[in-house]
Image (cartoon, rainbow, N blue to C red):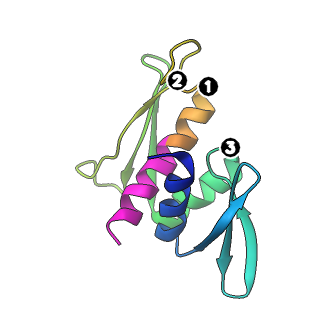
Amino acid sequence: MDDRQLLELAAKAAGYLPDGPFGRGILCLSGDHAFPFSPLSDDGDALRLAVKLGLTIANEHINSGVAYCYLGHDEDVEFPSVRSGENESNIVPSDYAATRRAIVLAAAEIGKGM
């Protein structure tokens, strides 16, 4: 799944209507309001998304460089993890990017189930 599809599913999970690409994210509609939605690159959008969906964010960067989310306080509903690092092709470059991507992956999984 590409980043745009992830963003569209994450937007759906948050109750937004995706309305096409916009900069590094997508344009979303909520009621009569249109706004850019870029949680893969914007810390604020990612945090708002996590809060809206009731996600708990877990970071194990000190020992393993891994970020993941789970739903609420129920660690039995855990979503895919993301590893940060510098030089490997399928690893995101920073702890912040890994955390944002973990949030979007969790939201996309929720969006798929809707």
Residue 84: mark in rendering:
2
Q: Which mark is residue 94?
A: 1
Sort mark 3 into few (<14), some (14-19) or many (20+) by Cα contacts within 10 Å.
some
Describe residue 50's horizontal placement relative to residue 34 as left or right: left
Which amino acid type corresponds to the residue marked 3 in the rendered image? Ser
Which residue, as the protein is rendered here, is positioned at the far left? 76
User: Residue 9: where, in percent of width, then height?
Assistant: 47, 62
Of 75 and 32, nearer the camera is 32
Q: Which residues are magenta?
A: 102-114
Q: In this view, which residue lies farthest toward the bottom?
A: 32
Give me the residue at 51% from left, 50% from top: 104
Q: Quadrant of residue 82?
A: top left
**Residue under numbered circle 3:** 41
Q: How far apart in space, not on screen, are marks 3 and 1 (Cα)?
A: 11 Å
Percent coordinates x, y for residue 32 in the rendering = 73, 87
Q: Residue at x 57, y 43 (%)?
A: 100
The image position of residue 67, as x and y in percent, is 46, 34
- Identify the residue shown where x is 46% and y is 68%: 13
